[in-house]
């Protein structure tokens, strides 16, 4: 049995997924909380070159992030040959809700997703989901997951590579080499973080540049950080990081466009320095990021800031690359659906932020997931 160590932080949902995956497959491991142990955090950075979690070591191999493909290759078992009534892509609010509704309709259901929770995991605080005065994204998605685990649903951590059709069945291939056959498909794979679009971005990702503040925030205690963005996610991150970091620089491309509740909290923080109408012009550093240059979009003046980390909160891109040419997408690469979650391909439904619905909220995504599941049930019933 290989020696496995997981470096994690308490609030990191992807760390929890690594540990859950290992436990599911009976793999013994040592867990080290680098959010509270600075010496171990330093060791992790020296070992991996990463200033982000999770980091997993398997003997001499280092796995950065929640790499479902590699973990499946090392420890997983492929599930093939079954024919499902419904295959759901994505395990965020829409996908998990769809799974529960499908299960309650006695449909043979499998959910394929790179993670459990989707975009909601990035939320430090959710204050508009009914039944909760305030809940973190991780805690809310954990409740969703608990309910799904109580149903007769196969939940597999994997990335979908392609979707096609053979005869009456849809065929789904994954990055780990598994193939699934299903009568219907519900697409609920959400979106991924938009990049800053600055040279050197890939080089510094995990080396001071982060797209998951809930995961990596604790590693920047008493340090200087920047948050790029002006929406709800950016302000949430700036507020939470102001309680962890010594100093926070908020870089906003135009003006702040966030809910008043977040604006009020942000204005009460004394260690947030705000730059309106600024964009990131350059990233600086050697092995690790140690500074940025920002540009005033009105005057053209550039300012260089020395810092330890940058959190990018500049929006999201639909995860629809594998659907190009298979069904209809709009100009933003979102899946076009009708009022009943039907796509342009009969038998394929879609729900949540990956679609062209205007309102992108957790509660509406969950509702759309329920609608898509009921439509899939009707489709299967009419086909038999």
Image: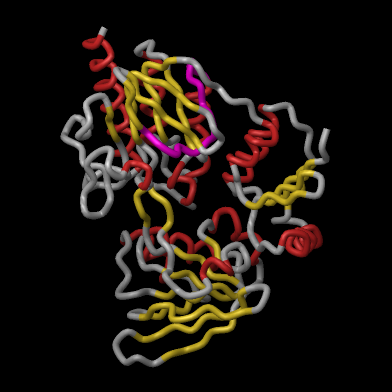
Residue 90, given in percent of the width and then of the height, sits at 42, 36
Residue at the spot 34% in from the left edge and 20% down from the top edge: 169
Residue at the spot 65% in from the left edge and 50% down from the top edge: 54
Q: Is residue 332 left or right of residue 197?
A: left
Residue range in magenta is 150-163
Count of marks, rendered view:
0
Q: Is 323 placed above or below 270 here?
A: above
Q: Is 156 placed above or below 228 here?
A: above
The part of the image, by quadrant, that contains residue 351 is top left
Which quarter of the figure is the C terminus placed in? top left
Q: How is the image coloured?
A: secondary structure
**Is residue 161 inside the magenta stretch?**
yes
Residue at the spot 34% in from the left edge and 75% down from the top edge: 253
The part of the image, by quadrant, that contains residue 190 is top left
Q: Is residue 291 left or right of residue 44?
A: left
> Looking at the image, which is closer to me, 136 or 21?
21
Task: Specify the principal SS of the magenta part.
Answer: strand
Does the image show residue 339?
Answer: yes
Does the image show residue 116?
Answer: no
Residue at the spot 22% in from the left edge and 26% down from the top edge: 346
Residue 13, given in percent of the width and then of the height, sits at 57, 44
Which quarter of the figure is the N terminus placed in? top right
Q: Is residue 79 left or right of residue 250?
A: right
**Is residue 311 inside the magenta stretch?**
no
In the rendered image, the residue lying farthest to the left is 339
The part of the image, by quadrant, that contains residue 16 is top right
Residue 204, given in percent of the width and then of the height, sits at 58, 69
In the rendered image, the residue lying farthest to the front is 166
Q: Is 261 placed above or below 102 here?
A: below
Residue 21, given in percent of the width and then of the height, sits at 64, 33
């Amino acid at each position: 049995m290989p020696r496995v160590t997981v470096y994690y932080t308490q609030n990191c949902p992807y760390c929890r997924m690594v540990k859950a995956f290992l436990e599911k497959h009976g793999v013994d491991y040592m867990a080290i909380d680098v959010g509270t142990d600075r010496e171990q955090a330093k060791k992790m950075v020296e070992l991996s070159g990463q200033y982000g979690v999770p980091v997993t070591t398997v003997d001499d191999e280092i796995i950065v992030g929640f790499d479902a493909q590699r973990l499946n290759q090392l420890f997983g078992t492929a599930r093939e040959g079954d024919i499902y009534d419904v295959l759901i892509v994505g395990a965020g609010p829409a996908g998990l809700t769809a799974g529960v509704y499908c299960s309650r309709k006695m449909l043979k259901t499998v959910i394929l997703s790179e993670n459990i929770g989707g975009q909601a995991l990035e939320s430090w605080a959710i204050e508009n989901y009914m039944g909760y005065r305030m809940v973190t994204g991780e805690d809310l998605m954990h409740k969703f997951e608990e309910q799904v685990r109580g149903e007769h649903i196969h939940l597999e951590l994997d990335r979908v590579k392609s979707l096609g059709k053979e005869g009456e069945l849809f065929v789904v291939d994954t990055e780990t080499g598994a193939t699934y056959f299903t009568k219907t498909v519900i697409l609920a794979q959400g979106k991924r973080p938009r990049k800053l679009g600055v040279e050197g971005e890939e080089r510094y990702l995990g080396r001071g540049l982060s797209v998951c503040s809930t995961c990596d925030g604790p590693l920047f205690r008493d340090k200087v950080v920047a948050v790029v963005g002006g929406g709800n996610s950016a302000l949430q991150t700036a507020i939470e990081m102001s309680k962890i970091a010594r100093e926070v620089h908020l870089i906003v491309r135009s003006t702040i466009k966030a809910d008043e509740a977040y604006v009020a909290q942000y204005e009460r923080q004394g260690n947030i320095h705000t730059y309106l109408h600024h964009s990131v012009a350059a990233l600086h550093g050697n092995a690790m990021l140690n500074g940025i240059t920002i540009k005033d979009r009105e005057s053209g003046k550039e300012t260089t800031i020395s810092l330890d980390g940058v959190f990018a909160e500049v929006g999201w891109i639909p995860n629809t690359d594998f659907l190009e040419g298979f069904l209809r997408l709009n100009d933003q690469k979102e899946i076009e659906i009708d009022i009943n979650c039907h796509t342009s391909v009969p038998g394929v439904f879609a729900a949540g932020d990956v679609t062209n619905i205007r309102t992108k909220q957790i509660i509406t995504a969950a509702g759309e997931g329920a609608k898509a599941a009921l439509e899939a049930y009707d489709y299967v019933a009419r086909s038999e």
